[in-house]
């Protein structure tokens, strides 16, 4: 069923996506500044109602953590309105359910963030980061599906995408998500960079991860932040992260050339 | 510790003799008197043992040195992120203190623990250890306590800190401490090397506490020297651990006049 383009709904969905993007950036700064535990209580902040925390406490790591919480509340509010709007005004059932999924997702994500603080569980941060990226994809997809371009495209000539290219893009997308999980795992070890040189790794193509070598790396590190000592697991995980990054680069390049070839064939 | 046991046993001895004499003076029957005398002998033996041990206990001392050049300490530039903290440093900012070495190579902040000695923790009755947050830094940064011994954390700054313990064997805590707020008290039930205290509001603030299940330990001072007092004669293993440079052990024999054992750490 065709759906009428609604500019206000589309731009609201774009606003939600932009706010989510900024929220993820701010969440990244929280982790980069090792500030995730700087406000130990939740949903209150230092015992205050979150929205009434005096500005004198917005300092150091607490600035990043507290503004992350406030922006998360804004995104939660925007997503709730978007879900209701879609429910009331969009005739496509599947997009209504996407709105419901976004609403449930933002609630779950908020609780996950709160539990990470309350339970002091580093590993929950990995899921919090992964859900954040998935949620961004979801709200961006809603913005796309409510756009004029998407609505009009149904009446225009379609180019069929071969099954091989679709599979290729699907697998590269999965690989990118796996890469995000690896990166989130590295970040939430709270150990800083396990390898600080590039393109070599501790001066070698593949670094020595023996106990003696790791002890030496730790002895040489002078950390200004409260990060943990690195382990052999973290060194190897960072190498896997690099290898997956090279693979993704090749996969995306191949997708580009395949898509271009397909486009040229379709235009002939 | 041994001294206190000796004094306690001595007092009990005097008490028991008084009871014995009193029992004899009032004309008690022979059997109760024999019982009392038996008790007296038991306490006399215990007391003599303790006194002998105390008399023979010696100090175990030594010097820790560092061979090689440690990596340069870094300026704690993140302090500039919080004006409350940077106001304490109108001139140069403080630096990290991973390798506290004097001109002669004497190494501070090495935790030295006597192993293989059967001595229960007296932490519950030991004097509390004070850790202060001053100028957005912890003082001291390295310390050692017994299991059950109180650590009192003060906030001498005019800004909020969160005191977050990151243990492996003990339970984690994360508490807010407002400027001028009440002191916080921490105790740890299980032994654990280098248990981290950190402030996530100011992520350059960290300190390490080694929790020992007994009273025989020391931390090397600015001159690299350490002394473990009143060690009963015997053969033991002495373990010296620097947070960055790892652990060294030595077999020592403590005699009535004490013993000496030096350690040299090397940075490659």
Image: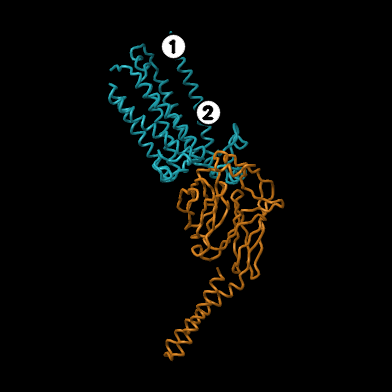
Chain colours: A cyan, B orange
Q: Nearer the viewer, residue B160 or B30?
A: B160
Crowd tier of the residue under label 1, counting other residues whose Cα lies within 10 Å: few below 14, some 14–19, many 20 or above: few
- Is residue B5 left or right of A166 when viewed as pictured? right
Q: Which residue in the protein does label 1 denote?
A: A265
Disc 1 and disc 2 on one polypeptide chain = yes
The answer to the question of whether label 1 and label 2 lie on touching residues, with beta carbons closer than 8 A, is no
- The subunit letter for the residue under badge 2 reads A
Q: Residue at x 57, y 63 (%)?
A: B216
Going by the picture, which residue comes out furthest to the right? B104
Q: Is residue B132 visible?
A: yes
Q: Is residue A179 visible?
A: no
Q: Earlier in the sequence, mark 1 or mark 2?
A: 2
- Is residue B263 left or right of B125 when viewed as pictured? right
- The subunit letter for the residue under badge 1 reads A
| Label at residue A246 | 2
Q: Position of residue B70 (x, y in %)?
A: 66, 46
- Disc 1 secondary structure class: helix
Going by the picture, which residue comes out furthest to the bottom? B27
Crowd tier of the residue under label 2, counting other residues whose Cα lies within 10 Å: few below 14, some 14–19, many 20 or above: few
Q: Compared to A65, does B219 lie above or below?
A: below
Q: Compared to A105, does B177 lie above or below?
A: below
- Disc 2 secondary structure class: helix
- Is residue B54 left or right of A122 when viewed as pictured? right
Q: Residue at x 47, y 32 (%)?
A: A25
Q: Position of residue B164 (x, y in %)?
A: 48, 48
Q: Nearer the viewer, residue A74 or B172?
A: A74
């Amino acid at each position: 069923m065709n759906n009428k383009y609604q500019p206000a709904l589309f731009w609201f969905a774009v606003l939600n996506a932009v706010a989510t993007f900024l929220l993820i950036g701010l969440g990244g700064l929280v982790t980069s500044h090792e500030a995730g535990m700087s406000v130990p209580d939740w949903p209150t902040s230092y015992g205050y109602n979150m929205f009434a925390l005096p500005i004198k406490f917005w300092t150091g790591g607490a600035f990043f953590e507290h503004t992350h919480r406030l922006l998360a509340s804004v995104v939660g509010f925007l997503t709730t309105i978007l879900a209701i709007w879609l429910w009331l005004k969009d005739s496509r059932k599947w997009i209504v359910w996407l709105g419901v999924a976004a609403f449930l997702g933002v609630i779950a994500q908020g609780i996950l963030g709160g539990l990470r603080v309350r339970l002091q569980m580093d590993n929950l941060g990995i899921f919090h980061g992964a859900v954040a990226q998935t949620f961004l994809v979801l709200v961006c997809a809603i913005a796309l599906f409510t756009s004029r371009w998407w609505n009009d495209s149904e009446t225009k000539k379609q180019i069929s995408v071969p099954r091989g290219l679709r599979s290729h893009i699907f697998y590269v997308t999965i690989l990118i998500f796996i890469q995000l999980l690896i990166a989130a795992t590295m970040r939430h070890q709270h150990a800083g960079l396990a390898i600080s040189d590039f393109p070599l790794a501790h001066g070698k193509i593949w670094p020595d991860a023996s106990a003696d070598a790791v002890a030496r790396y730790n002895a040489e590190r002078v950390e200004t932040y409260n990060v943990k000592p690195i382990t052999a697991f973290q060194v190897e995980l960072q190498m896997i992260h690099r290898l997956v990054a090279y693979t993704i680069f090749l996969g995306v390049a191949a997708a580009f050339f395949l898509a271009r070839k397909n486009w040229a064939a379709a235009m002939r | 510790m041994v001294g206190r046991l000796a004094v306690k046993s001595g007092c009990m001895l005097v008490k028991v003799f008084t009871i014995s004499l009193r029992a004899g003076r009032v004309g008690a029957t022979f059997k109760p008197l024999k019982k009392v005398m038996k008790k007296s002998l038991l306490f006399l033996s215990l007391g003599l043992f303790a006194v002998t041990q105390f008399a023979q206990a010696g100090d175990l001392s030594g010097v820790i040195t560092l061979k090689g050049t440690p990596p340069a300490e870094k300026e704690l530039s993140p302090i500039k992120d919080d004006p409350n903290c940077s106001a304490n440093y109108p001139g140069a900012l403080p630096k990290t203190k991973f390798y506290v070495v004097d001109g002669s190579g004497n190494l501070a902040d090495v935790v030295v623990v006597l192993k293989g000695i059967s001595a229960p923790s007296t932490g519950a009755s030991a004097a509390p250890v004070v850790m202060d947050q001053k100028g957005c830094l912890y003082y001291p940064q390295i310390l050692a306590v017994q299991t059950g011994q109180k650590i009192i954390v003060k906030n001498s700054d005019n800004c909020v800190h969160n005191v977050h313990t990151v243990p492996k064997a003990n339970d984690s805590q994360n508490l807010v401490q407002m400027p001028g707020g009440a002191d916080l008290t921490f105790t740890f039930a299980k032994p654990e090397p280098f248990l981290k205290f950190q402030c996530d509001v100011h992520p350059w603030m960290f300190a390490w506490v080694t929790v020992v299940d007994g009273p025989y330990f020391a931390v090397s001072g600015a001159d690299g020297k350490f002394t473990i007092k009143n060690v009963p004669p015997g053969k033991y293993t002495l373990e010296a651990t620097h947070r960055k440079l790892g652990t060294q052990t030595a077999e020592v024999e403590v005699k009535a006049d004490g013993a000496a054992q030096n350690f040299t750490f090397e940075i490659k």
